[in-house]
Amino acid sequence: MPIHYQLLHDEITNEDWIETSLHGKTLLTIPQLNKGIAFTEEERHEFGLLGKLPPKVETIDQQTQRAYGQFKAFTSDLQRHIYLNNLHDTNQVLFYRLVYDHLAEMMPLIYTPHIGTVVETFSQQYRKPRGIYIDYPNRNYLDKILSNRTNPDIDLIVVTDGEAVLGIGDQGVGAINIPIAKLMVYALCAGLNPLRTLPIMLDVGTNNEKLLADPLYLGWRHERLQGEQYETFIKLFIEAITKRFPKAFLHWEDFSIRTAHQNLALCENKICAFNDDIQGTGGVALATLLAAVKSIGTHLTDQKIIIFGAGSAGTGIANQVFAAFKRQGLSDTEARERIWLIDRNGLLICNMPGLNPHQTLYARLIDECQGWGRNNLGHISLAETIKWVKPTILIGCSSVGGAFDEEVIRLMANYNERPIIMPLSNPTPNAEAVPADILRWSNGKALIATGSPFLPVVFEDKTIPIAQCNNSVIFPGIGLGIVAVKASKLSADMLWAASETLSHCAPILHDAMGALLPGIAESRQVARKIAIAVANQAMKEGLSQTNIIDVAAAVDRTMWQPRYYRFRKKSHQ
């Protein structure tokens, strides 16, 4: 290990501390360990820091006050983003404390929607290494690469191959910023200790011609691997991870629909794994729907749903809703009849070429669409599908900005007293519609949730909050619950417990003018509730790999607060 430190816990005193042999300038350059001018007098003497810092010893509260003043001095989002990242690269604990204290203001700068720009400009803006890069040419050195990580003990890993980033597609090595950002959200919204996490980039090449032609591109300059080569590489990766971190939680992020389900299946019975694009997106969308239908006095099984976008997110939502329909008494056939998927080639029809198995499940029979209008390519459009199906719910995960136009919204409003409309694509320019337009075109009737953050909308003298149906309100709690009990598997019932718990937290259930999901200010409380529900379900199914008596206490012990640890000198042996 290149960084010699260990996070230790005294069960008797219930105290955490860091033991390290590092000292002097080296200690100040490790962001996970650096406390800046908060190092005590005793620590300055013991670790060779005397004279290397101004004489005043400050608390983290004082440091946070100064950092916020520095942050506010910048006038553009780009400048503020750069400042936050520089702080993260200098003093990790102070970064988390600052953002935690100003979460609503700063989260958009480190996560969606700003993270898309950061990914796209990675090679041009590269400043300092973060995370672990595993490129295909070095596949035979996997164990060595993993041993070069900074954090000694790992509870949580977020990994990507960068093929399907947000709505901007194949971003190659720049996608490392996605696992980094996801882990920030885990720490901020659920208290997963950043000293026990690991972001990983699997560099299997890229098909992005712009990146391949860019002389500054930092990734493996090769077309993206597919087929047997790719699968063999993934198997090697899973084998290396399970060998070194057998009880870790493995979070897959931004893989294409072609590989997402396959990679998740390869983890079966090997390591606890989760695909956020499939299970996270599906889980939070289902929670939103449960809250929405309850708020208007109907039932989920009464709904007909059109999902515009049939990639990993769209099929993931369909799968979660399908499972929920069955939980509430519908047969397979009845559940499938209520879900309609549309992709770039229009409504999914059984005879369409190129459908993958997860899309085929929801493809309609040709006879169902007899007499429906088709465009000059023979495809059935979104508007045409709405006219025939008369859905109660419209969900967008297509990355086609503006796809929910005035005709589409007015159709939904004509068929429903309270249509549920969820343009979930991000970043913001990819949203299928913006809330102000939806409310105007539906005459204020629509219940709305979006993927990107939007300010409340004033409509007819009423201020209407817009729920952000972003995975960040569900995956942190799922991860917290799994880590707390060291679950060996994420089961379907654990996912249901997460969605159902989140739906109960919806403000609209207590206030008719409330949002469909809780806001970011409540993220830790919500994550804790989800974690307890997930952990209890894991215990019920016998999936815990540790002896837990009190689940809530285990969750609370797992939740990290952004504070400094006391340091102890590690003796040389």
Image (cartoon, helix red, strand yellow):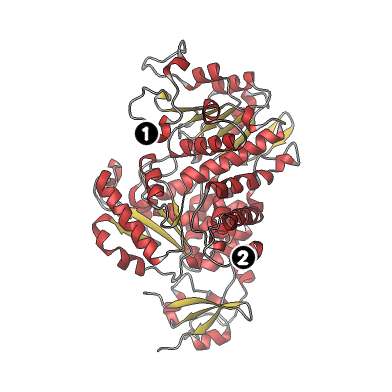
Callouts 2 and 1 close, C-beta under 8 Å: no
Q: Is residue 516 left or right of residue 223?
A: right
Percent across and percent down for residue 461 are: 74, 31
> Which residue bears the numbered disc 1?
356
Mark sitting earlier along the chain (2/1): 1
Where disc 2 sits, the SS reads: helix
For this orientation, the residue located farthest to the top is 371
Percent across and percent down for residue 163 are: 36, 44
> Which residue bears the numbered disc 2?
554
**Amino acid type, callout 2:** Ala
* Rendered image quadrant of residue 58: bottom right
Percent across and percent down for residue 5 are: 45, 77
Please tell me which residue is depicted at 43% across the width and 71% down the height of the picture. Answer: 152
Please tell me which residue is depicted at 58% across the width and 65% down the height of the picture. Answer: 558
Most foreground residue, 460 or 370: 370
The answer to whether 236 is drawn above or below residue 258 in the figure is: below
Q: Is residue 181 visible?
A: yes
Most foreground residue, 202 or 558: 558
Q: CA distance from mark 2 to mark 1?
A: 41 Å
**Amino acid type, callout 1:** Asn
